Amino acid sequence: MMGYYILIGAIALVSWLVSSKLKSKFKFYSKVHLQNGMSGAEIAEKMLADHGIRDVKVVSTPGMLSDHYNPKNKTVNLSEGVYNQRNAASAAVAAHECGHAVQHAQAYEWLTLRSKLVPIVSVTSGMSMWVVFGGLMLGAAAGVGFGYWVAVAGLVMMGMATLFSFITLPVEYDASNRALAWLKAKHIVTQEEYKGSEDALKWAARTYLVAAIGSLATLVYWGLQVLGGRD
């Protein structure tokens, strides 16, 4: 178990460092005010309109960096700061979330696949670790039949969460690329503002990358504990 605690500690540390860097980047670029004076909400509405999307609403949601696109009710949810503010950070976030709306409207394959996995992962991710533990307690490491298959079932659940994490990467990177391309093509931001938006989105994407690597590392560790005990 010591190895597991070290692994979790290392992942948590890297995640904290990236998250802290992301927050500092957004704080910095929140001071880079847009020359066009548009708010995050206005930018989101314009991007949707420019892509011919009329059935998606832009709404304000509580919290910091709580921005997301909800495909079920077709809403671009912007945190209060992003919704109202008029800076490079809010422009980046608003356009990024609209990037997901564009993906949805165009049936982007990776978003479609991720959406199909959501119901499965929402059920299995929370219990996968307990199922693996249960299997190990029943003798999986010693190669005992029932315990082994219980632990394998837990690994499959954990694997689904890992797969979901990696499928999320192209979805997030593509949304950022769509956002940045639109911001530049429509001259929504100046060159300086664009650099700020681009840098902010790069750090946001790295949080997903760290999460995916951490999920894979955890899966490999427990896979070795379960499968390594078999002759």
Image (spheres, grey):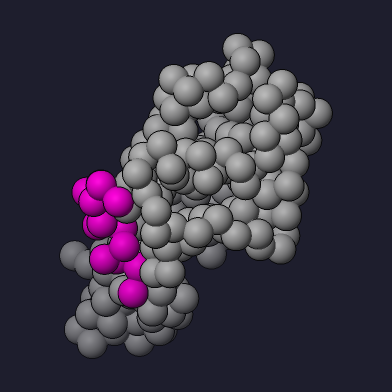
**Which residue is more in the foreground, 220 or 27?**
27
Q: Is residue 157 left or right of residue 50?
A: left
The picture places residue 211, in percent across and down from the top left corner, at 49, 49
**Which residue is more in the foreground, 126 or 47?**
47
Q: Is residue 65 left or right of residue 57?
A: right
- Residue 117 lies within the magenta run: yes
Which residue sits at x=60%, y=60%? 59
Q: Is residue 208 above or below residue 190?
A: below
The picture places residue 135, in percent across and down from the top left corner, at 35, 81
Q: Is residue 217 left or right of residue 65?
A: left
Q: Residue placed farthest to the top in the image?
A: 191
Asked whether the viewer can see residue 52, the reply is: yes
Q: Is residue 104 above or below residue 140?
A: above
Which residue sits at x=43%, y=79%? 127
The picture places residue 126, in percent across and down from the top left corner, at 46, 76
Q: Residue placed farthest to the right in the image?
A: 31
Question: Looking at the rendering, which quadrant does residue 172 occupy?
Answer: top left
Which residue sits at x=61%, y=42%? 42
The picture places residue 222, in percent across and down from the top left corner, at 39, 62
Total marks placed: 0
Asked whether the viewer can see residue 217, the reply is: no
- Residue 159 lies within the magenta run: no
Chief secondary structure of the magenta portion: helix
Q: Is residue 37 above or below residue 61?
A: above
Q: Is residue 215 left or right of residue 43?
A: left
Which contiguous range is marked in magenta?
Answer: 105-119
Which residue sits at x=19%, y=65%? 231
Question: Looking at the rendering, which quadrant does residue 154 occupy?
Answer: bottom left
Question: Looking at the rendering, which quadrant does residue 17 occupy?
Answer: top right
